[in-house]
Image: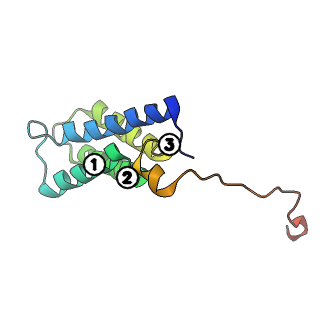
Amino acid sequence: MFPTGLPGIGLIAVRVTVAAMLLVDGSPYGVPQSMGRATGSLVAVVCLVFGIFTPYAAAFAGCLEFWRLCARDNVDLFHLIAAIVVSLALGVLGPGGYSVDNKIFGRRLVNLPNGSQGNSSDY
């Protein structure tokens, strides 16, 4: 489900924070990067800010930050590790109620069947 209210606003803040980390890491005065990495960062930033396919965009952002960590382009190690952790946490938490994902997929509740109604003799 996509939380609204204060939890939804908190998820907006996390999405914008992850996007800002990508922008700062890919800025012209920051670490020089290839055109592919810059384009990938821009796509991930747009998806994260608007909440489009947030779990995938967050995982992709975490992969981009991990790539920067492996490249070791004179970067702050703590900053990159924090960016990776926050990106992956956002991927697990999801987009929130104030996102395009909420408008596309809507709020869904998964009802699991009760264990006593199933046929337990098959186990």
Give the mark toward the camera: 1 or 3.
Answer: 1
Report the residue marked by disc 2: 52
Q: Residue at x 27, y 46 (%)?
A: 45
Q: CA distance from mark 2 to mark 1?
A: 8 Å
**Label 2: how many Cα within 10 Å (few below 14, some 14–19, many 20+):** some
| Lateral position of residue 114 relative to residue 3, left or right | right
- The percent position of residue 53, horizontal first and vertical second, equals 40, 54
Q: Residue at x 17, y 43 (%)?
A: 26
Q: Amino acid at mark 2?
A: Ile
| Lateral position of residue 85 relative to residue 38, left or right | right
- The percent position of residue 108, horizontal first and vertical second, equals 60, 53
Q: Amino acid at mark 3?
A: Leu
Identify the element where label 3 is drawn. Answer: helix
In the picture, the disc for residue 46 is 1
- The percent position of residue 100, horizontal first and vertical second, equals 40, 50
**Label 3: how many Cα within 10 Å (few below 14, some 14–19, many 20+):** some
- Sequence-wise, the earlier of marks 2 and 3 is 2
Report the residue marked by disc 3: 93
Where is the C terminus found, in terms of image quarters? Answer: bottom right
Q: CA distance from mark 2 to mark 3?
A: 14 Å
Q: Are marks 2 and 1 in contact (CB under 8 Å)?
A: yes
